[in-house]
Amino acid sequence: MISTAIRVARVGSGSELAAALLLGISFPCVMLAAIIPHFWFFAAAAAVTYLADTFLHQRGSYLVNRLAKVRAGLSIRFLIRQMLLVLLVARSGLGEDRIFYVTVVAVLVFYGLQAPHGAIVTLLRLRRRLPVVTRNIDLGAIRIPDAPPPWLLNRSAEKMLHLDVFAMVGVLLTLETRENVYGYAGLGLSLLLAVGYVAALLPYLRPSRLVPSAEKVLKAVDGWLADYRPTVMLYFSGSKESAYQVNMWLETMDQLEGRPLIVLRERVIAQQLGPTAVPVLCVPGGVHLMNLDLSTVRVALYAANVGKNIHMLRVPTMRHVFIGHGDSDKLASVNPFSKAYDEVWTAGRAGRDRYALADVGVRDEDIVEVGRPQLAPIEPASGSTRNPVPTVLYAPTWEGWDDSPGNTSLLLAGENIVKRLLGAERPVRVLYKPHPFTGTRSAKAKAVHERIVALVEKAAAERATDPRWAEQSAALRTGRDAARAELARIEARLTELSGVADSSRDEAEESRDAKADPARQAELTRLRDEWNTAYWRSFGWWEHRVIAGAEPRLYDCFNESDAMVSDISSVVSDFIASGKPYAVTDSAGLGAEEFKRQNTAVRAAVILSNSAGELDQLLDAVTDPAADRLAADRRELKRYLLGPDEPSSIEQFNAAARTLAAKAQARNVGVEQRLAGPEEAAAPDDSAPESNDLDSPVRG
C-alpha cells in the first residue's frame, strides 16, 4: 500500500511521502492554533512545517514543483505562515499593542525584499549563462570572470525565505514572556539579514563580473572554428537518459583522422558526456547553430534520429551520415528517416540486407559497411572459461515505448532466466546488467527488475556463507582487500581529474577552464582500465553481482563473462564480436525458426522460450567445447553482422570518411565554379585539394 502511494505521489521514498503528509497536516494545524489561540500548539506545528519543507527541498522532491503548480509554492507557504503569526499575535490580546503593528510592517518589508533578491539572482543566472557550452575549446579571446560563491545562488529563494525564522522565534518569545524586546530583536535580525543578502549579491552585477554578451561569445567561437577548421563532426541531440548513445562514439572520435568536433544540442547532454580529448561544442539555440561557421566540416555523423537533426541536415556543404547507436534487428535500425542522410553506415552486410528487406527508401548504393570501431575492446573467446566457475551475463534491454512482448525478455522471462542460472546443477556466477532505461516507462518492468536484483543479492549472500567457497574466500581475502584499496585510490584520482568534486564552478567557468589536455585524457583512460581490473579483483570469481551503473562498462562485462543471455538489441550483435556462446529469448513466442528468420543476430544463438528451459544447452556449450555445436555458426555470423576483421574497423571508418569528404569537396567546388560563371568555371581550380585528405578542407 505504501509503495502504491509512493508511486501515485511520484515521490522517491517513504520519507518523502511522510514529509509531504506532515506538510499537508501541519499547515491547517498552524491555522487552528492561531485561531484558538494556543502558543505551544502553534510553535510545534510551525516547526514541523519548517522541517518538512526543508527536507523536501533538500531531496529535490517532485512534490515541491507540484505545489508551485497549484499556487502553493515556497513563497506562498512562507507568507501564509507569517500571516498566521500575525493572526496569533492579534488573537493573543496584543492586537492594539505596538508589537502587532511592528510585526505587520516587518513582514511586509521582508516580503518586499524578496522581489529585488529574486530579480538579482535571476539576472545573475541569466547573465552567467553562455549561449554555448564548450569543452577542449580555447575561449581565451573573451573574458569570463569567476562565478559568485555557490552559497549565494544555490537554493537562494529557500535561503532568503528561511531568514524569517528569527522573526518567528522572536515574536513567539514575546507572546510567551510579554516582553516586546524579543519580537523587535527577531524582526530586526530577519530584516537586517535579508538586506545583507541582497547587498552581498549587488557587486556581482557589475559589468566586470558578468560574462560577455552572446554576440561576443559566438564571435569568439567562430574565431576558434576558423583557426581549428574542423573536418568531421559528430552531431547529437537527446534526453539525459540517451547520453550513452553519444558516449559510445567518443573513443572512435578520438581516433578519427582530420580534425574532429562533437556538436551537442542540450546542456544536460554536455553534463553527461564522458571524458574526451575531442573539442565539444554544445549549442542549444537553433538560430545560434545555424549562424556558426562550420564551412570547413565535410562529414557530419549522426548517432540518433531526432527532430533537431534538421538544423544541421540543412547545410549543403557537408555530407550527412547516419551511424546510429547500435546494430540490431529492432525496427529502429531501419527507420525510414534514414532517407534524409547522404549515406547510412552499417557494421556489416547484415545492415545492408536489413534495409533492403525493410524497403524504407534507403538505396543500396548509399549504404557503406564500416564495421563497429567501438568493439575493439572486446576480447575474443579463449576456448576455456575465464575462472573455475563459468560466468553468465544477463543483459536484457528495456521495455521500449509500447507493450510489445518482443521488446524485452525482462517482463515474461527475466525471473525464470535468473532463477534457472542461480539454481543450475553446475554452479555458475551470474552478472545482471540491465539497460539504463529499464523501468523508466513501465512500472511492471521496474517491479520485475527489483525482484531480479533481490534474487541475485540473496543468492550472493547465501554463496558468501556457503562452505564450498570458504577456502577460496580466505585465500583471496588479502588480494580482495588490496583491490578495494586500489579502487578507492583510483576513484579519488578520477574524481580529482574529472573536476566533479569542485561544485563551486558554474557552466561558464567550466567552459572557460575545460581546455584540451592530452596528458590528462591519457591518464583518465589508463585509470579507467586500472579501475576495471581492480573492480573484478575486489570480489571472488564465484560471487554473483548486480551491475546497475555505468561502470564497469558493458564491454568489460563481456570480457569477464563466458556466455550471455539477452534479447533483441544491439547488445547481442556486440557480444557476437567475442565469439562466445549466447542465448536470446523469444519473448513474443514466434518459435525458434521464425525467430531466427526475423532476427539475424539470433541465428547462432540458443533460443530460449519464456520458461528459459533451454538454458542447459548454453551451459553445456560453456563448460564443454565439444558440446558447443554453434561455434562455427557464430564465426560466420560475426563476419556477416560486423564485417571482416581486416582491415580494422577504425581503418574502414576513416576510409569511408575520407571518401565522403572528397565527394563533399567535389560538390562544393562544382557549385563555386557554376556560380562564378563560364570563364572561371573553365579555369583549373587551384584551391581544390589534390587528395581526399580530411586534414585539407577547403571552405565551401
Image (tube, grey):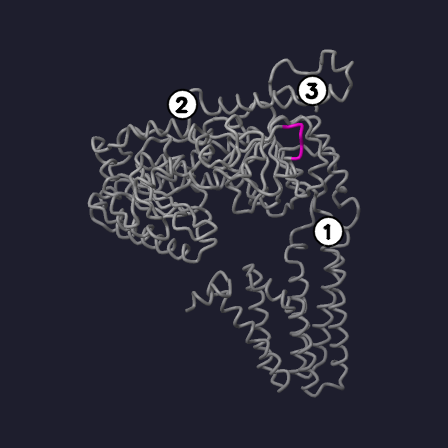
- Residue 278 appears anywhere in the view: no
Q: Do the numbered discs 1 and 3 sit on residues whose CB atoms are within 8 Å? A: no
- Cα gap from disc 2 to disc 1, whole angstroms: 55 Å
Where is mark 1, residue-wise?
Answer: 124
State the image coordinates of residue 60 (x, y, percent, origin top left): 56, 59
Where is mark 2, residue-wise?
Answer: 645
Rate crowding at label 1 as few (under 14), some (14 to 19) or many (20 or more) other CA atoms within 10 Å: many
* Of pointers 2 and 1, the one earlier in the residue sequence: 1
At label 3, the amino acid type is Val
| Residue 628, placed above or below residue 204 | above
- Cα gap from disc 1 to disc 3, whole angstroms: 47 Å
At label 2, the amino acid type is Asp
Which residue appears at 46% of the width and 35% of the height?
528
Which residue appears at 63% of the width and 35% of the height?
313
Which label sits in the foreground, 1 or 3?
3
State the image coordinates of residue 365 (x, y, percent, origin top left): 52, 25
What kind of secondary structure does the magenta stretch mostly adopt?
A: loop
The secondary structure type at the circle numbered 1 is: helix
Front-lying residue, 200 or 394: 394
Q: Which residues are magenta?
A: 314-318
Where is mark 3, residue-wise?
Answer: 669
- Cα gap from disc 2 to disc 3, whole angstroms: 36 Å
